[in-house]
Image (spheres, rainbow, N blue to C red):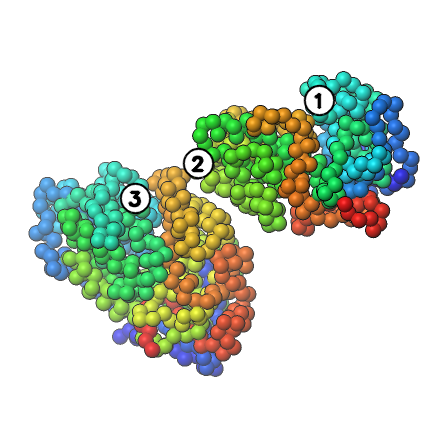
Amino acid sequence: MRALKISRKPAKFAVARLMSPISAAGAAKYGPLDLVNENAPALPSGDGWHRITPRLTGICGSDLSLVEGHASTYFDDWVSFPFVPGHEVVADCDDGRRVVLEPVLGHAARGLPLPFDGAAPGDGDDYAHLVGGCLEPGIQTGFCTSTGGGWSTELIAHESQLHAVPDDMSDECAVLVEPAAGGIHAALATWPAVKAALERGETPVVAVLGAGTMGLCAVAGLRAFVPGARIVVGARYPHQQALARALGADVAVPSDELSRAVRREVGCHVVGDHLSGGSHATIDAVGDSSSIAASIKFTRPRGRVVLLGMPAEVTVDLTGLWHRETALVGAYTYGTETLADGSRRHTFDLAIELARTARFDRLLSATYRLDEYEDAIAHAAAAGRRGAVKIAFDLRPPHQETR
Amino acid sequence: MPRPGFVLDVDRSTPPILFWRGENFSLEKLPAGRSRVIYPPEPLPAIDDIDGAIRHALLNPIDQDPLPSQLFPGMRLTIAFDDVSLPLPKMQRPDIRQRVIEAVLDLAAEAGVDDVHIIAALALHRRMTEAELRHAVGDRVYDAFAPRGYLYQHDAEDPDKLSFLGTTPHGEEVEINKRAAESDLLVYVNINLVAMDGGWKSTATGLSSYKSLRHHHNPETMTHSRSFMDQHRSELHKSNWRMGKVLLDSGVKVFQIETTLNTDTFPKPFDFLSKREWEWTARDRMTFLATTKALNRTPHRLARDIFHSIEAPHQMTSVQAGEVEAVHRITTEHVYKQQLVEVKGQTDILTMGIPYISPYNVHSILNPILVQVMAMGYYFNMYRGMPLVREGGVIIMTHPCRPEFNPVHHPSYIDFFEQVLADTTDPHVMSQKWEKQYAEDEWYKHLYRTGYAYHGVHPFYMWYWGTHGMKHCSRVIVVGGDPKTVRRLGFVPASTMDDALEIASDVVGRAPTITHLHTPPLMVADVSL
């Protein structure tokens, strides 16, 4: 198989880190990423394993941070090198199904007992399983040496990770199911704050800072699964603002205007550079020092900030968070969700529905062949600036029709 | 003897014409044979004995008893005065308001009046700083009244300090400052910089609240005010006059003191800005060159500070006191005498250079909304009879139109620019959809009452001010403006005057007539066919 592979080579990570501010393509070329021809991963001994051949695989922000050498050292113990990145996958399964991959390598995939009946791969309050069982450590497919990843022509996946793609859903739409699930998970993480506002008779305001793929998916998730919320989005680029509106935002403004837009919605005062009140909840889909600081400033006291964008090391003055008793919670992947009406659903099931109804295929801006990976990485790294949203690898044989 | 204003037909020998560009200027060559430039009249001579004239007006009022006979011990006397929005630029000390207020206070003291309040009639404008109040009323008045709380600023958002007086036959609610309404005598001290000022607008607008103002500061009224400088054809004035009748009927006794100024606008070395270009001396040309070159290298903020530090040498040309309407008729004649220029016929393109200042950005930034109001609200309306530009014509203005706002003075303007103008530039639509939210925003109210912010609704009023102009013209072009900002205003950006004329040719053809309004100094075009 052909694959893009990342090896643990500190010098190459250092080169990538140095080059990325100048050239993402250069970071891809001279960094830890190599295009290789090698044997496909072996199937583990347990039941339910399949070989899958990717059709489209997305390039995610977390993938970029790896390629560019910015990923946190936190992951050193949760991944296993060398690995093939790529976890936003629509693929053909060896049993003939067309599937999307739920990449978390959960209990079932590792041959371990489920934390509860019907648990999704992302469920569980003890992460020991992520480094145990029949696989090498790895939080997801795409970060585990045992399974391979989506930036290749073949990988292995466990039955618990596979979801059949409806026949009427295109590959271009299906490749957005995984980020859609992440967006829904973050959207539902605002529900406690939204619900409390509704119970007080207020109109809940949810701010979303950042409108790349994840921010846009969160907007769609809010509109679909968080009833009653007024959604205010701060997006850096005009096409992102337009998409945010199309996906259900009530207000979409340039990012640096978001604080004032939130203030207008809630009618509060401004004290220094903080709002006296603010949004009931905020989804930070950027995840850097300034976005976290900004989110705290325009989220109301005792409000909730949901950190969707993957941060690394950040420097933030948390005095405001302390004083305002703001809840800062992470939103990583997906699992089993409790919806507003009290029902429980797997996030991926919701995501498949949402990707279709919200026409997520419009978020896929460009595809590249695997051997064009330097251009693909460069495009993905500059997606917003270049008017794009999601960039993906197209691994289908040439001229194969989209389904 | 000062020369009257006149209209210059541009020919090949005409030198380039001065255009203001905010805190800078440029010289533009207008096409010969089809362009004309309207120059304002030269400044009229000031009254020699200003204090004597003021005292004479107070002792010999029009259609009212002399002021001393209206003053008595134990009475409640309120003196209201025009705020920081005029004159422009601020006048060299002593300000004419100081001289009038001191004269009134002298008479009040002679009559044994000791219950005197002095109120800045700022309506929904920003509050004045101590320095601005001192400049307007003088240190002696300020030190005697302000520390004890007898000199203060009208607060249109304090329900306990407002008095509802009734409604006009048109259903317009009249609510004004309670102290003013309940005084035995309200003395209003006005500076009539343009023909729009004064009359019942002083009290019915300057001392009122949003509840009253919304009845005439709206797109419908503005559309039917043609122009603001011609009070008999201005719905804005008719509404104020109706409100004035409610004031009278409810027993408010007003002693109106109105003053007019000449148009001696710029001191040396900026006096070349008031001259006609072909009369520029070598020194003027050198000053122009040195100034523009220096300003090109000066940070905007510093350039702004320099210009706002200018104090105008303009001086009083008339003062009259007494009954509001009788006084205002004479005042208006004096304004016209100074500012009126006869002009024959309309033009296809009206050009104008927008300066650094307007009534709403003293010591502040002429933000994009204020650029709009200067062009479409003020300069377009500087006419009597008919607009200078024909219906369907084009306005070309020069201004950098940067997306800069003073967050202390104009906080709601920032939101207006980001939210309202992003949604619509139609005054009627925005008044229905957005005005109430801004007028009732508690944060804006707080800043208006406790800081130095214009009221939340004020940017709407600024936009409405241009309603007639925007409806009348088919295109508005801004030369040298920030393109994104200009487009947000609904206007068309152009890099140069030649580009602007090319853009305009889509609408007015390739050989349009062009008229340049050479202001400031202020003028009103008396346009007839």
Q: Amino acid at mark 2?
A: Cys
Taking A128 as reference, is B311 left or right?
A: left
Residue A119 in the image: above or below residue B225? above
Single out the mark in the foreground, 1 or 3.
1
- Quadrant where the N terminus of chain A sits is top right
In the image, residue A62 lies at what x, y percent? 72, 36
The answer for how far apart the CA atoms under marks 3 and 2 are is 20 Å
Q: Determine contact: label 1, label 3, CB under 8 Å.
A: no
Q: Determine contact: label 2, label 1, CB under 8 Å.
A: no
Query: At 8% from the left edge and 52% from the top edge, which residue is drawn?
Result: B69
Packing grade of label 1 (10 A; few <14, some 14-19, many >=20) is few
Residue B263 in the image: above or below residue A3? below
Query: At 68% from the left edge and 20% from the top edge, which residue is drawn?
Result: A125
Work out whether residue B295 or residue B25 is closer to the camera in this orientation and state it.
B25
Q: Which mark is residue A109?
A: none
Residue B332 in the image: above or below residue A249? below
According to the picture, the residue beneath numbered tag 1 turns out to be: A118
In the image, residue B79 lies at what x, y percent? 20, 48
Q: Amino acid at mark 3?
A: Ala
Q: Amino acid at mark 1?
A: Gly
Q: Which mark is residue B156?
A: 3
Taking B517 as reference, is A223 left or right?
A: right
Q: Is residue B138 visible?
A: no
The answer for how far apart the CA atoms under marks 1 and 3 are is 64 Å
Chain under numbered label 3: B
- Mark 3 and mark 2, same subunit? no
Residue A396 placement: quadrant: top right
Taking A355 as reference, is A84 left or right?
A: right
Q: Which mark is residue A268?
A: 2
The answer for how far apart the CA atoms under marks 2 and 1 are is 44 Å
| Element marked by disc 2 | loop
